[in-house]
Structures are given as structure tokens and as C-alpha cells.
Image (cartoon, grey):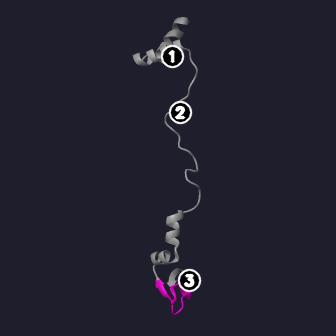
Amino acid sequence: MPYVYVKDSEGFVFKKKESEVAKGEKVISEREYRKRSGLALYEKKFGHGGARENAGRKTKFASPLKFQIRVTKEEKEFLSYARDKKLDFAALMKKAISTNL
């Protein structure tokens, strides 16, 4: 049995089965029912309920988070020099490994 929304002679609204509607009750739309019953205002103010904001799984980032390690002043200068000159560390390591063998 489908449900309908009705308003009685005193202005109160209800959700009833279609077969239970009495003579003095007027069938209204769901929108009007939500407005008169206060459900629309409640949902607007409090939302849908459920989980709190920002709950659940966190998104995976494409780049890893920044991390810090302690280095000496010379190491820091070398790293900044290598970044400025755009040195390819992978190529340098391969070259270093191949010369040691």
C-alpha cells in the first residue's frame, strides 16, 4: 500500500496509508508535508545526521609528505648546488657504481 501525506481539519499533518485516509483529511504533497511538519527546517539546520564532518578514509596524496633530516652545513650546500645545476642523482650513482667495480 502506498503512503500519502494528509492534513486534517485542525491543520496537523500525517503520513498514512492510502486506505486509512478519513473524510475530513486533505491529501497534500510531500513538499508541503515536510514544510508543515518541520522536517525541512530540521534537515536544513542539522543536516542528514550520520558521521561527523571529515570522517572516513583520507585521500592518498600523489606526492609524499615533506620530511626533514639533519645534515651538516657542507651537505646542505652540496644539495642546494645539485638542485641549482639540476644534477641527475640516478645517473651519478650508476656511474659511481660502475667505476668502483
How far apart are the two marked residues, 3 and 2, measured between alpha carbons? Answer: 57 Å
Q: Could you say which quadrant of the image residue 22 lies in?
A: bottom right
Position of the C terminus, as image quadrant, is top right
Q: Residue 76's mark?
A: 1
Q: Position of residue 41 (x, y in %)?
A: 50, 70
**Residue at 48% across, 13% down:** 92
Which residue is nearer to you in this view: 38 or 58?
38
Amino acid at the residue labelled 2: Leu
Q: Earlier in the sequence, mark 1 or mark 3?
A: 3
Amino acid at the residue labelled 3: Lys
Q: Position of residue 25 (x, y in %)?
A: 51, 89
Q: Residue furthest top?
A: 100
For the record, the magenta segment spans 7-27
Q: Position of residue 58 (x, y in %)?
A: 56, 45
Q: Position of residue 40 (x, y in %)?
A: 49, 70
Q: Earlier in the sequence, mark 3 or mark 2?
A: 3
**Residue at 56% across, 14% down:** 72
Secondary structure type for disc 3: strand
Mark 2 is surrounded, within 10 Å at the Cα level, by few (under 14), some (14 to 19) or many (20 or more) other residues, namely few
Q: Residue 65's mark?
A: 2
Mark 3 is surrounded, within 10 Å at the Cα level, by few (under 14), some (14 to 19) or many (20 or more) other residues, namely few
How far apart are the two marked residues, 1 and 3, measured between alpha carbons? Answer: 77 Å
> Compared with residue 63, is residue 31 higher up or lower down, i.e. above or below?
below
Q: Residue 17's mark?
A: 3
Which residue is nearer to you in this view: 66 or 29?
66
